[in-house]
Image (cartoon, grey):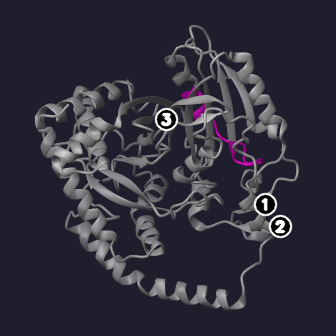
Amino acid sequence: MLLPMSPTDSTFLMAESREHPMHVGSLQLFQPPEGADALDVRAMFDAALADDEVAPLFQKRARRSITTLGQWGWEVDSEFDLEHHVRRNALPRPGRVLELLALCSRLHSSLLDRHRPLWEMHLIEGLDDGRYAIYFKVHHALVDGVSALRMLSRMLSDDPDLRNMPAPWAPRMQEVRDQIGPGPTPSSAVRGALDILGEAAGLVPALARTLNRGLNAQSASLSFAAPRSMFNVPITGARRFAGQSWPMERLRQVGKATDATLNDVILAMCSGALRAYMQSLDALPDTALIAMVPVSLHTPGPGASDGGGNAVGAVMCNLGTQLDDPVRRLQTVHESMIEGKESLEGLSPMQILAMSALGLSPLIVLPLLRLNGVVRPPFNLVISNVPGPNQPMYWNGARLDGLYPLSIPLDGQALNITCTSYSDEIAFGLTGCRRTVPHLQRLLGHLDDELVALERAIGVG
């Protein structure tokens, strides 16, 4: 049976091509339990692989046909092959983090097989410090970044002594209950239809409000202020990835001293790093770069978003990259994000999704008309912050040492910066088009320089 796919989810399938893979990923670094070696790690992985119970979400395959009038839907893969999705890799000598990032860059460049469920997990051995890594990727049509991180968190525990833990693809009891639970009642269907009509009636004033803010250069889900930049050009399918972590307390001290949020400080670090990077290439625009900042609409809770799908709004943020003072850049970001949050006040999740879709629509229209790099882009890059576990986590005794996100550069959007919090650190994951964004790893140094500059300017650290 073919189940309908939401328009938001199907957009990621329609936008995908060989040059534009549409999956998100995650790199996790683990320290094996005391006394364990690579063979023990492989044995744990094999034991998880031997459990052939797979959650319904991981068995969903995308398909469309004449009977669906060309629309995408989901069906269960009747010939599901777990070993196709779960694989092993080994790093070449000397097995440094450099080789690990290079491997993840290549893995992230390849398309997922549309004839199968749209996910893969790779155990990566051979790191010279004795750790091992897991690279996981999943199509954005199946889940968004928040959902993907929550699914991965299911395989982890805060108990270092816990063993025989389930694999991340194993079903949960809630999923089993959902499958056998009662369906919707006629009264709930009527209420749902009335809610949709009420939401649709509110779209016209929401649209007018969003357009007005965009035309007046105020932060909203739509912007007309983004300059042309080196990132807003056609891209290739090859990827380069770089990642690094910073102590979260350093960012919090900066935020506390300036009445800014943690997310404001992250955006300000990106602003200063982008300014320095683009100046080094003589490519810094005279006006401020505009970042699209995703806003999660998922409900909180451990079981939320287990069914997959996308629930993301968008706010356009002025990064203040034309300013040479780090504190002024932070203030500009802070004020822009306050404006952006105010623009969403009073809107329902459906209305936020609709306004966000309007702001993102040029990403589809401009490539079709071959106008990338010719007209103003809707924004210059995506910068997102996805919350992760707030305490140390383990998988069968192996300590999670690092959690780095890999995301999606788009045609006309050659660089994506995604951050993930974990325990007492914040990890920056930079994913760029290999050809369009040269020396991507230099941005990590510029991020560190900007954090130091902020600390010095306000007298903390």
Magenta stretch contains residue 108: yes
Foreground mark, 3 or 2, reads 3
Residue, x 64% and y 54% (percent of image)?
142
Q: Position of residue 430 (x, y in %)?
A: 42, 35
Secondary structure of the residue carrying tag 3 is strand
Q: CA distance from mark 1 to mark 2?
A: 6 Å
| x 68%, y 42%: residue | 112
Q: Please, what secondary structure does the residue beneath circle 1 have?
A: strand
Query: Residue at image x 73%, y 50%?
Result: 58
Nearer the N terminus, badge 1 or badge 3? 1
Between 169 and 87, the residue placed more toward the observer is 169
Residue 263, given in percent of the width and then of the height, sits at 32, 49
Mark 3 crowdedness (10 Å alpha carbons): few <14, some 14-19, many ≥20: many
Task: Using the image, determine if residue 97 lies above or below residue 174.
Answer: above
Is 451 or 144 nearer to us in this picture?
451
Residue furthest right in the image: 79
Q: Which residue is mark 3?
A: 404
